[in-house]
Amino acid sequence: MVLCISFIHKIYKLCSKISQCLVMKRKLSSSLTLKESQPSSTLYMKETKQESNIRLAIVSGFFATIGSLLGKLAGGADVDSIFGLLLKGVLLILMIISNTVGYAFFVKALNTSGSSLPCTITSAATSYICSALTGSLIFNESTSLTWWCGISFVILGLLVISCTQSKDNHVPFPKRSKSE
């Protein structure tokens, strides 16, 4: 459990660094085009904003896990009696509410973020890890080393895509003439 929490914390720090690099890149490109620099207080506000975006993405991942848990519980509920049918209905409604709240947090994180990649990486990583923990603690499911390696590769792939896209943004486009 402590290992998973430290893993989420490391992903959080990595996503924060990626966000800071993207903000610095934007600041540099805008200062080159506008020939003016931003005050340091603006940079501090942007860094604080990025950290809150990552927190919102983590909360989104937790709500996605809760929605998955409620959906699995609803799928396993017996509908032999009226109580079972009512329980299944309540669990399905709670699943929809949980997923809606999770998506609301994720959209809020995306709307206030400069880049969608850190939010996506953080939300996906949180959801994967919390789903594995929930499955093992509540449903006694086992996760193999292969599963953990697979999840690590998915998260690593998202990070590689994030770094690749930020490098591709430096490619200058040819200028068009006014007649085109």
Image (spheres, rainbow, N blue to C red):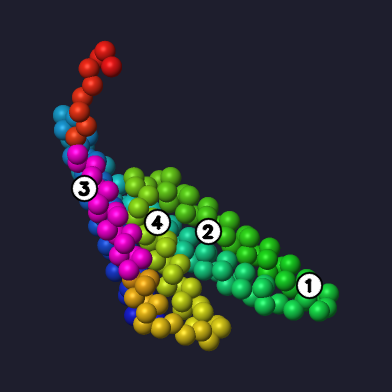
Which of labels 1 and 2 is toward the front?
Answer: 1
Would you say 133 lies left or right of 164 here? Answer: right
The numbered dot on residue 141 is none
Q: Earlier in the sequence, mark 4 or mark 2?
A: 2
Which of labels 4 and 2 is toward the front?
Answer: 4
Q: Which residue is mark 3?
A: 167
| Main SS of residues in magenta | helix
The quarter of the displayed image where residue 147 is located: bottom left
Q: Earlier in the sequence, mark 3 or mark 1?
A: 1
Would you say 171 lies left or right of 130 here? Answer: left
Q: Earlier in the sequence, mark 4 or mark 3?
A: 4
- The number of numbered discs placed on residues in the rendered structure image is 4
Q: Residues within 10 Å of mark 3 (few under 14, many from 20)?
A: few
Tag 3: amino acid: Lys
Give the residues in magenta: 153-171
Closer to the camera, 11 or 79?
79
Instruction: Measure the C-alpha gap from mark 3 to mark 1.
Output: 53 Å
